[in-house]
Image (cartoon, rainbow, N blue to C red):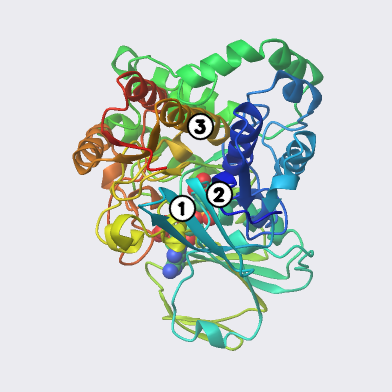
Amino acid sequence: MSDDDNALDAIIIGAGFGGLYALHHLRDGMGLNVRAFDGASGVGGTWWYNRYPGARVDAPSSPFYAYTFSQELVDEWTWTETQTSQASVLAYLEHVADRFDLRKNIQFDTWVTDARYDEDRQRWTIETSTGQTASAQFLVCAVGALFVANKPDYPGIDDFAGACYHTGRWPHEPVSFEGKRVGVIGTGSSGIQCIPEIAKTAAHVTVFQRTPQYSLPARNRPLTAEELADSRADWENLRTSMRRRGGWPFKTTRRRSGDFTPEQRHAIYEELWEGGGIHLAINSFAGVLSKKDLNEEVSEFVRGKIREIVTDPVTAQKLMPSYYFGTKRLILDNGYFETYNRDNVSLVDLREDPIASFTPTGIRTQNGEHPIDILVLATGFDAVSGSMLNLNPKGRDGISLKDKWASRFDNYLGTTIAGFPNLFMIHGPGAPGVFFTMPLGGELTTAWIGDCIRHLRSNGLGAMEATHAAENGWDREINDIADRTLYPYTDSWYMGANVPGKPRQFLGHLRGSQYFDRLTEVAEEGYVGFVLEPAHH
Ligand code: NA7
């Protein structure tokens, strides 16, 4: 790859779903000169790293958790299960990289270690872990919403002498649990997905749980040839529905809970539980995520299911969640609660028996010793803002993002930041991100970024930068939506509450379809909220 300093139009950081599409769109759709960088040795981003046993898309996935832009791609790729596995998603992204000949413009095994904006040249310059520099007018940060691992800081954890794996940094070689005593800390999606798999072969699994979770049955099953054929035939309509319905092609219900008796409501919950997936949340009654009484009824229904499944009442009691249903990431499981009926699985409730320290051979809690051979940290991520802070770009006047975001993750439209001209985020704080189907969300965001670039280029402009006033307005807009729901009541990674010391702020836009309408509106109104600067050269 040439290092001709003025040759690049855009640098893309990240080769996951977001970065790959950005490369394709900017390079092939717009004819720009683009180079992407990724610290990993291959494409995939999140799906490159999260290889733990049982890893699957934690939403109704196939065939919708996929790119939508190419009918040919839709027609030629065969999804096999309703809940796509990590291996399938990764294989798909590798296929996409080959099919659209993307690898030739991606530099793997290369971390971007610094990124600085040069106001005179209106360009970004990056430095890499391989000692290179490169510059481009635009910096597209597709750095992943769930990338920076959140590792607990327990006393003595580094003294633990056994193997230790974080689910978000899983090794590429197979890990054998055969005959091993395994400790798992964390019961979010990753923990709940891997615990049943690990329990199949381990001598013993001890789960260390801080917050009990609502988890719904995924009911994963083979995708039928007919379902696949139907979705291919109707792809354009499905794509439109996804765009209009918050990322998924399903209708969410407008049914009013008050129009039904408690018995009728219960029957509806039963049916949706049996059907599996997230339908209990989106298709039972309108307002499950915003009305406390209705939410409590659904919460109690799920607690009842846990009591039914888990045979030991003491364990079942420890598994009872109490936060508002759905206000942490909804989890879809394949036999999670059933796993506690196995003889080789036990549960430590950290609320009543907290971890005191680690020893070389295990975990010491307040009430006892737990000898383990392998430690699995399913403790999540410094989500959404963490990967941008990890990059820590330096904008106008050399201000660093760490300084700018010290107490609040200010941004405009979830894609731009005042003080950081010509920098675009895909799935940044303030964007729909995980609240929308991420592949489609990335496509729509990238299309908007491409339009920004086109607008600048065709009007003799060299830079665009969000204003502070626009950031403040955006903050209000996002919080007005979130405050109408129950999300802010719960400590979750959506609120930044999972990482000690992280500012508490809702990290997403809950109305994806409305959000993409807003992006269009901002462009149509001449990029309101931005300062557009004439090109210097
Ligand atoms: P999550 O959802 O953040 O879950 C992390 C889990 O780890 C959760 O149960 C946490 O408890 C627990 N945790 C975190 N730190 C600690 C410490 N210090 N001690 C004990 N337990 C801890 O991450 P996942 O990887 O499961 O999922 C992330 C997303 O990836 C998921 O939402 C999907 O979108 C895919 P807490 O609930 O914070 O009390």
Figure check: 204 above or below 334 = below
Q: Quadrant of residue 345?
A: bottom right
Q: Quadrant of the C terminus?
A: top left
Q: Which residue is mark 1?
A: 124
Q: Amino acid at mark 1?
A: Trp
Q: Amino acid at mark 3?
A: Gly
In space, the residues marked 2 and 1 are separated at their CA atoms by 11 Å
Residue labelled 3 has its Cβ within 8 Å of some atom of ligand 1: no
Mark 3 lies on a secondary structure that is helix
In space, the residues marked 3 and 2 are separated at their CA atoms by 30 Å
Residue 480 x/y as whole percent: 22, 33
Residue 500 x/y as whole percent: 34, 67
Q: Amino acid at mark 2?
A: Asn
Residue 436 x/y as whole percent: 48, 32
Please give the label number shown on residue 6: 2
N-terminal of the two: label 2 or label 1?
Answer: 2
Residue 384 x/y as whole percent: 43, 50
* Towards the viewer: 60 or 209: 60
Mark 1 lies on a secondary structure that is strand
Q: Is residue 400 left or right of residue 22?
A: left
Q: Quadrant of residue 469?
A: top left
Q: Residue at x 67, y 65 (%)?
A: 344
In this rendering, the label closer to the viewer, 2 or 1 = 2
N-terminal of the two: label 1 or label 3?
Answer: 1
In space, the residues marked 1 and 3 are separated at their CA atoms by 25 Å
Mark 2 lies on a secondary structure that is loop
